[in-house]
Amino acid sequence: MDESTLNFLSFPGKIHLINTDAELKAVAPAMLETKEFGFDTETRPAFKKGEVYQVALLQLSTETDAYIIRLMRLKSFELFKTIFENPEVLKVGVAIRDDLKQLQKRFQFTPKNFIELQSVAKAKGLENMGLKGMTEEVLGATISKGPKTTNWEAHELTDRQILYAATDAWIGLKIYNKLK
């Protein structure tokens, strides 16, 4: 598929940028009512050998709302533990094993009902296992991967970073719903 002829998809809904425990508390009721999330994380890239950073951002998205959560600014992770351990809530993403391991370094939880989109793609006979490739194959559109290697720990995130983060979580859910 020629990428230049594909439509670019980006998250069309409301983005909630969560910087504080108070902001998280304000969206908690809506998040706790949700039955399915697209799931992703972002970590500041390391460019030197031995350099490692903690997960900076957790993204959870529905069809209409994306929650972009700046983990390094939070003290309470109880809400995520509740969502992540709830077998009634679907969480879908790509290459989530490492994301979950990194999140477990920040707070303890037992992951339940996380769906690896690559496994679904494989079972459906898809050729592409990356999020961008799956978007092109399943939805006939593409997504930007531009801000992937930017500093997710920056004091202020750019609008481009925020939209990229929301799109990455949302598109996984969108692909999953199309495939199932």
Image (cartoon, rainbow, N blue to C red):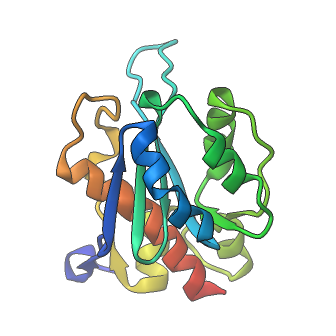
Q: Is residue 70 visible?
A: no
Q: So how many labels did they put on this image?
A: 0
Q: What residue do we see at 52% from left, 69% from top?
A: 172
Residue 100: percent from left, percent from top: 67, 43
Between residues 75 and 99, which one lies in front from this camera angle? 75
Q: Quadrant of the N terminus?
A: bottom left
Q: Is residue 110 visible?
A: yes
Question: Is the residue 53 above or below the residue 24 in the image?
Answer: above
In the image: residue 137, left or right of residue 10: right
Between residues 27 and 151, which one lies in front from this camera angle? 27
Q: Quadrant of the C terminus?
A: bottom right
Between residues 3 and 76, which one lies in front from this camera angle? 76
Quarter assignment of residue 36: bottom right
Q: What residue do we see at 61% from left, 63% from top?
A: 32
Residue 80: percent from left, percent from top: 62, 47
Quarter assignment of residue 9: bottom left
Between residues 35 and 90, which one lies in front from this camera angle? 35
Q: What residue do we see at 67% from left, 81% from top?
A: 125
Residue 163: percent from left, percent from top: 27, 58
Question: Is the residue 179 above or below the residue 66 in the image?
Answer: below
Q: What residue do we see at 62% from left, 36% from top?
A: 103
Quarter assignment of residue 46: top left
Residue 60: percent from left, percent from top: 50, 58
In the image: residue 65, left or right of residue 33: left
In the image: residue 92, left or right of residue 140: right
